[in-house]
């Protein structure tokens, strides 16, 4: 028995319904043996209006490789796509719509587990919200950040550098020809913004929550590591399907506190609090403003990527990734928190990365800032005083 046996109430006869589904799947050329495997859905969200997801077809292929190698049956399906730069008036209007799309497609279709593939700002929270409500075993795979471009010897990465050069253009410091050249070098690869914006922040948070594989948050979209992570995620999806490991078994109050610690330590986007509150709410948990302030007062900032520092997400990946940050924070984290792998956070961390670039990930004893970058002030988020 596998996911193909789900949801027969509308058909009546169970045996006939299974026969009907298998008949239609044979139309796709799948072997009879493959239809006995765990069915792993792959929620995809590519769009020509979403360059963050441009490399998604190749990434999905890597997921399918992992699923097949682990003995599963991959079944990719589309959901709506939220391209941050193109939606009016804002992509936030459509986050809950995407969450509903993901939830209903995961619930309605016969699958034993689902891999959520996305990265653009509102996509990851929408996918998590939908999957948490659907209650099926799930694992997140982010698309990864862009690699930086180059302009006259300077590294560029949307979208912080975009605003900086546009300000100079409006001030008359940059002419028409120069701004046109800059425009073509701000976003030169597939992937989410190269800076610590909302997309990068959510990628780190989902790994800290335990809903993505260790080491999966930071690999650039065009790096071979991203495809290796995709293959490993596909294999992991088969394991969680067989174990019946649902999100409510993975994400706990301890996981939520760990995610907040990471948010503070990486100087993450304030938008992440809005999304994390919504995601946690799907499992009956809440983000406590007082607890956030307590964590902020006791969590140093270890990473300062643009827009607050000089580095980019590709630098964080080359410096040991989120594992380097988690290892520095380990005495402040709840290492008993579960992860989607079936291991605890402490077991996953092990001894930490063999090498860390301390210009990018500062040691706990010598942080970039002594306290977290966010506080809850009179009902709203505010930057913590330096």
Image (spheres, helix red, strand yellow):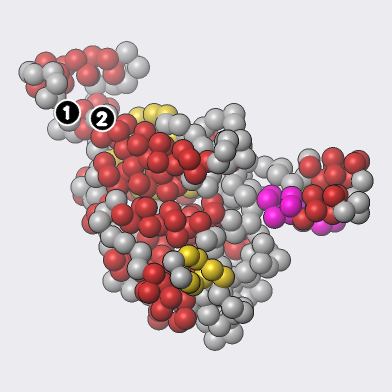
Q: Which residue is mark 2?
A: 108
Looking at the image, residue 150 lies above or below residue 4: below
Q: Is residue 127 magenta?
A: no
**Mark 1 element type:** loop
Question: In the visual, does 353 lie left or right of 330?
Answer: right
Write down the quadrant of residue 302 in the picture. Answer: bottom right
Residue 353, position as x, y percentages in the image: 51, 70
Looking at the image, residue 92 lies above or below residue 29: below
Label 2: how many residues lie within 10 Å, few (<14), some (14-19) or many (20+)? few
Residue 45 shows up from this direction:
yes
Residue 355 shows up from this direction:
no
- Of residue 230 and residue 157, the one placed in the foreground of this image is 157
Region rendered in magenta: 153-163
Q: Which residue is mark 1?
A: 7
The earlier-in-sequence mark between 1 and 2 is: 1
Q: Is residue 162 magenta?
A: yes
């Amino acid at each position: 028995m596998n996911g193909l046996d789900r949801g027969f109430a509308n058909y009546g006869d169970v045996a006939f319904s299974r026969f009907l589904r298998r008949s239609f799947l044979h139309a796709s050329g799948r072997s009879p043996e493959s239809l006995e495997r765990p069915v792993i859905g792959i929620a995809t969200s590519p769009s020509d209006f979403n360059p963050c997801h441009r490399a998604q077809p190749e990434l999905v292929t890597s997921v399918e490789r992992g699923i097949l190698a682990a003995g599963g049956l991959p079944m990719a399906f589309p959901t709506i796509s939220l391209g941050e730069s193109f939606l009016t008036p804002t992509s936030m209007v459509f986050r809950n719509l995407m969450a509903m799309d993901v939830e209903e497609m995961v619930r309605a279709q016969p699958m034993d587990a689902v891999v959520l593939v996305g990265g653009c700002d509102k996509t990851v929270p929408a996918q998590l919200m939908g999957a948490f409500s659907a209650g099926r075993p799930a694992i997140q795979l982010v698309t990864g950040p862009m690699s930086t471009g180059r302009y006259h010897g300077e590294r560029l990465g949307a979208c912080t550098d975009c605003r900086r050069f546009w300000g100079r253009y409006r001030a008359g410091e940059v002419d028409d020809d120069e701004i046109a050249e800059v425009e073509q070098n701000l976003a030169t690869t597939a992937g989410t913004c190269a800076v610590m914006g909302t997309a990068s922040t959510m990628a780190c948070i989902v790994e800290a929550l335990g809903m993505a594989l260790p080491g999966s948050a930071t690999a650039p979209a065009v790096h071979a590591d991203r495809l290796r992570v995709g293959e490993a995620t596909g294999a992991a999806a088969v394991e969680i399907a067989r174990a019946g490991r649902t999100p409510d078994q993975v994400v706990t109050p301890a996981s939520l506190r760990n995610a907040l610690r990471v948010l503070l330590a990486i100087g993450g986007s304030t938008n992440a609090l809005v999304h994390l509150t919504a995601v946690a709410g799907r499992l009956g948990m809440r983000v406590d403003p007082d607890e956030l302030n307590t964590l902020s007062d006791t969590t140093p900032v270890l990473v300062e990527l643009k827009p607050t520092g000089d580095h980019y997400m590709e630098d964080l990946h080359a410096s040991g990734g989120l594992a380097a940050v988690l290892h520095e924070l380990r005495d402040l984290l709840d290492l008993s928190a579960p992860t989607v792998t079936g291991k605890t956070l402490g077991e996953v961390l092990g001894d930490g990365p063999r090498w860390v670039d301390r210009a990018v990930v500062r040691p706990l004893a010598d942080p970039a800032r002594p306290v977290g970058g966010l506080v809850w002030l009179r009902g709203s988020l505010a930057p913590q005083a330096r």
